Image (cartoon, rainbow, N blue to C red):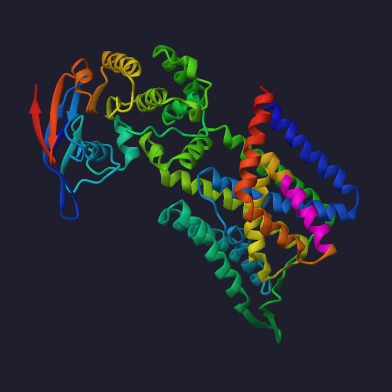
Amino acid sequence: MKRIVAETAVMLSLAVIMSLSPYYSWLFVLMSIYSLLTLSWLFMRKAGRISMGHSFLFGFPVFLASAGYSFSSEVSIQLFIAGCALSFVIFYIFAEMTGRTAFVFLTLVFSIFVWVSSPKLVFEKGGYLTGGEVGFSFPTISQKELHILTGGTLTLFYLIYRIIGESRAGYFMRAVGDDETASKAVGIDLRKIKALSILLSGMTAWSAGIIYGLEFGHISPEIFSVEISVFPFIASLIGAGNPFASVLSSFGLVYLSKILNSMYPGLMGIVYAAILILSPKIGWWVYVKGKRLDEKAG
Amino acid sequence: MLRVNGLMKRLDSLVLLRDVSFEAKKGEIICLYGPNGSGKSTLLKIISGLERADGGHVFFRDREITNLSPWEIVENGIAHAFQIPRPFRSMSFLENLAVSCMRYMDTDDAFRQAERTAEEFDVDYLLERSSSSLSQGELKILEILRAYLTGAELLLLDEPFASLDVENARFLKEKLLALKEKQVSMLVTSHRMRIMEEVADRFLELKEGKLYAHG
């Protein structure tokens, strides 16, 4: 419990420190969006499902909401709710239909399909064409409000993640993540646990998507990009699967991408590719290091 | 307590179980033996819901449980321990045991119950060990205690003595007898006949999917 309080205090301190400059406040919001995406991914991985198409869960409801916003706020809200429900159902069906390996590829292929086909959503509004590659506009709020909303949301979902980890549901998710057949043999209802992990993952990703929309005031099909899909995998790899370390590595990766892309656009993509290629070796190194640190800590 | 009537299982044109019928009483240990591929593990998996029967019926405490889902069968009081232990690798010995109790009690009570059971079975020295660091014998104990802690009245033990040395096999035998004293029934598949003679009340032979009673 002390550890959770200390980790939350570190996150809140970061939120306060980064609120002092407008640029860092903007950066904090961006870092938190990606941290929420990583937490969302970790919820699903806890129950043994590695998603490589998390951009769909993250982007789909807010993409629909932004399209609906062209008509009215009410339509936007209704489409957002429909998007949340649909993305949950699709991921749940994928999890039920496939094994662990197939799930990785199915989510990746599906998110690429959505990324490629989303620019085809174009309609006429007030004599102008809207949608396509450009996307749709989305309402914004002041940077100060956004900063508070983001810091609060990140803290809330981080606490939910940690508290659930210590609960019965958290142990069941870990059991399912470790071995589905053994989980069945001790009486765990796999369907319920899979649905719960996808729901928690979805709630985190949907919140991140809304904040993303509020931050940029605009949603384009790029929200479904592969870069966003693989981001949480890379962040959790660097964070060795530990939620706090993964949140911090999300912060670090976003900061690094800002620096590298200002030097040479697309450089961060090369870094991601290198991490993915070296991921088995990095994973092993992080595992051994983490084990030594654990042993030292007693 | 357990009643199996005319159980059938086919795999394409191959008949794995043909018209298998038997009964087990409360607190009874039944040894199921037979050559490899005779259908012993398949029979256990069908009773525990991990595989579906193509015909026949399974009753437990006069309630039909044929082809129920595995978690429903555990709720009815039957648990399965695998031949090759399947621990939850990210968890310690204690957490593995506690998970089994969490279905019917809160997490704190589940940990207490798991600790008590480990003490009772003289394996409390393993509690803090990571399951990935356990020996084969220790994993077998974990597998059986985890099944027992689901609240099971009938344990289906698939080859519990396989790949155990003499000392570990003797230790495990004592644990099975301790479970028997608690009126837990067991259906045990095994090739280790000498040790099973010290444990089992009755023997059933499965040959090419057909059941024969002995002793």
Q: Is residue B79 above or below residue A131?
A: above
Q: Relative to A26, is B86 on the left or the right?
A: left
Q: Relative to A90, is B40 on the left or the right?
A: left
The residue lying toward the viewer, choosing from A51 and A191, is A51
Q: Is residue A246 above or below residue A254?
A: above
Q: Extreme right residue here?
A: A21
Q: Relative to B35, is B138 on the left or the right?
A: right
Percent from the top left, x then y, of residue B124?
47, 15
Residue B44 picture quarter: top left
- Viewport quadrant of the N terminus of chain B: top left
Q: Relative to B16, is A191 on the left or the right?
A: right
Query: What's the residue at 27%, 15% (across, down)?
Result: B177
Percent from the top left, x then y, of residue B49?
28, 41
Percent from the top left, x then y, of residue A178?
48, 39
**Whether residue A36 is visible:** yes
Query: What's the residue at 65%, 40% (across, down)?
Result: A286
Say whether residue A257 is magenta.
yes
Q: Is residue B14 above or below residue B191?
A: below
**Whether residue A77 is visible:** no
Percent from the top left, x then y, of residue A270?
71, 61
Residue B69 picture quarter: top left
Main secondary structure type of the part rendered in magenta:
helix
Say whether residue A233 is magenta.
no
Q: Which residue range is magenta in the image?
A: A249-262
The residue lying toward the viewer, choosing from B59 and A152, is B59
Residue A294 picture quarter: top right
